[in-house]
Image: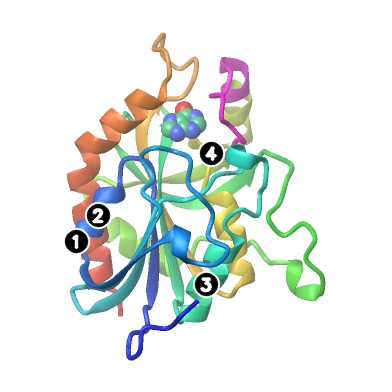
């Protein structure tokens, strides 16, 4: 990927469903479309713009990714590999992820945010399939950096902390799957983030992740699930998430 002379981002931010508006918080240096970046995936989810915005939040140089590709789009877990490699090559040391998720906890209602402490990969696939060398045996202890997590919690209001479980999607989970996920120790469920975390740790990046609850997971309440609700709740809570991300990035040393 071409360099922007004199600009070296420290933090890459992936904006999840309904949260793309955070890119407006960036004082831009350059905006690039994924389509002009080699290897970057097309994004097929309408709410994901497919743009990379390079610039500053406060004094922190950032690379903001408006949109991600998901495993469910083409059945490839390594869809985001070129993106994560590119941000590592640009000089980023940290990947901050956001996502929309379903809550498995009745005390964590739609609109709540959760800093991810750990994850469960429930898909059976891994974005590092096919990699060679010992580097592929990535240590996943503290994959979500404890110091960054503390800073993320401090930057928000009433932030929950918990474990994120990755289901493949694109269908939502069944109530039985959600009951199983609760037994396994999950607090939130979603269709993203985990492959990017694995790829980022493989590339030597520190990771932090924030989940915005857009619904109670299947079966917790009589409600029906749908992408429209995900977007509606995400848009409602977007301002709060934006402030939290801004504070986190401004305070990033
Ligand atoms: N399940 C999976 N992904 C999601 C959900 C959910 O309930 N809500 C938002 N993304």
Q: Residue at x 74, y 74 (%)?
A: 135
**Which of disc 3 and disc 1 is earlier in sequence?**
1
Question: Does residue 219 sit above or below 136 in this rendering?
Answer: above
Q: Is residue 125 visible?
A: yes
C-beta proximity under 8 Å, tags 1 and 4: no
| Residue at image mark 2 | 22
Which residues are drawn in magenta?
167-178
User: Dot 4 lies on which element?
Assistant: loop
| Residue at image mark 4 | 191
CA distance for labels 4 and 3:
22 Å
Quarter-of-image position of residue 111: top left
Q: Nearer the viewer, mark 4 or mark 3?
A: 3
CA distance for labels 1 and 3:
22 Å
Q: Residue at x 57, y 50 (%)?
A: 194
The percent coordinates of residue 207 (x first, y second) are 48, 64
User: Dot 1 lies on which element?
Assistant: helix
């Amino acid at each position: 990927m071409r360099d922007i002379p004199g600009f070296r981002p420290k933090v890459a931010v992936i904006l999840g469903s309904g949260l793309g508006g955070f890119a407006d918080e960036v004082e831009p240096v350059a905006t690039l479309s994924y389509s002009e970046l080699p290897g970057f995936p097309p994004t097929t989810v309408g709410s994901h713009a497919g743009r990379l915005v390079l610039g500053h939040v406060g004094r922190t140089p950032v690379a903001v990714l408006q949109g991600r590709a998901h495993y469910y789009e083409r059945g490839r877990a390594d869809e985001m590999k070129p993106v994560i490699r590119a941000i590592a090559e640009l000089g980023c040391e940290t990947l901050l992820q956001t996502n929309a998720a379903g809550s498995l906890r009745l005390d964590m209602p739609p609109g709540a945010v959760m800093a991810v402490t750990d994850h469960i990969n429930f898909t059976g696939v891994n974005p590092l399939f096919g990699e060679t060398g010992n580097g592929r045996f990535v240590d996943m202890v503290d994959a979500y950096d404890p110091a960054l997590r503390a800073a993320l919690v401090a930057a928000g209001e009433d932030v929950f902390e918990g474990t994120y479980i990755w289901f493949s999607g694109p269908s939502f989970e069944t109530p039985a799957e959600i009951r199983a996920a609760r037994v396994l120790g999950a607090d939130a469920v979603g269709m993203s983030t985990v492959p990017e975390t694995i790829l980022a740790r493989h590339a030597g990046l520190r990771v932090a992740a924030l989940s915005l609850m857009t619904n109670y997971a299947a079966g917790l309440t009589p409600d029906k699930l749908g992408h429209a609700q995900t977007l509606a709740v995400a848009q409602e809570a977007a301002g709060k998430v934006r402030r939290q991300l801004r504070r986190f990035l401004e305070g990033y040393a």
